[in-house]
Image (cartoon, helix red, strand yellow):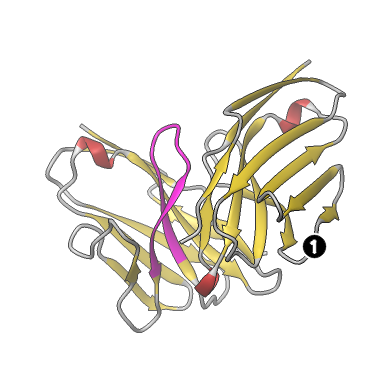
Amino acid sequence: GESVGLHLPTLSVQEGDNSIINCAYSNSASDYFIWYKQESGKGPQFIIDIRSNMDKRQGQRVTVLLNKTVKHLSLQIAATQPGDSAVYFCAGRGGYQKVTFGTGTKLQVIP
Amino acid sequence: SAVISQKPSRDICQRGTSLTIQCQVDSQVTMMFWYRQQPGQSLTLIATANQGSEATYESGFVIDKFPISRPNLTFSTLTVSNMSPEDSSIYLCSVVDSGANVLTFGAGSRLTVL
């Protein structure tokens, strides 16, 4: 099955700065790559996804970049806010809609 | 998007007992999954709950330990059997929201086994 992992376990960012969270994956069978945000005491919340045949997708304040050559995925958050503080997971979706999660990065926004 | 309710939200259990977690969805869904999230860890898929047939378990998870029911398209249960402290985790129900084609999660059930 897919194996997805993250480079950095924690990331501290000043409020207003941009955040970049990175993720590496080892199996190219995923048809979608997804970013989730998990706040304390809650289930993961979908942020944005990208099809495996794309290299960039933008949402509101977030951009996901996919580099299939080096099997790397990143989430960029513009103008990071205190409400962005959470754990972020990358994930890959494979057969039968099964989603495999990476290890997670904790984002701490410094006011 | 689909709204998922899980019960209990948290519980403290004694070693050797079993606990059943319920997952209720506000709409009919085809695909329903159960995940485990151990303290400070990522999410690991336990099984796919299939309506009208036996659940499909991932490697490392077995039906005797984690029996699953899926009586209809809006409800599922996961039982954690013969619990040990190693079973202390958050157990999350998730569904594929057919409208958005997105995996949506409940808030989870936090189990602590003493």
- Residue that carries the numbered disc 1 in the rendered image: A54
Horizontal and vertical percent position of residue A101: 53, 50
Q: Looking at the image, which is closer to me, B81 or A7?
A: A7
Q: Residue at x 24, y 38 (%)?
A: B86
Label 1's element?
Answer: loop
Residue at (55, 67) in percent of width and height? A94
Residue in front for this viewpoint, A36 or B9? A36
Q: Residue at x 48, y 42 (%)?
A: B42
Q: Chain of mark 1?
A: A
Quadrant holding the N terminus of chain A: bottom left
Magenta stretch encompasses residue B34: yes
Q: Look at the image and give the residue range highlighted in magenta.
A: B33-48
- Please identify the quarter of the rendering in which residue A20 is found: top right
Image-quadrant location for residue A9: top right
Give the vertical position of B69 relative to A37 (above or below): below
- Tell me where residue A3 appears, x and y as whole percent: 50, 52
Point out the residue furthest to the bottom here. B52
The kind of residue on which mark 1 rests is Met
Using residue A45 as the reference point, say whether residue B38 is left or right of it: left
Depth check, front residue: B102 or B29? B102
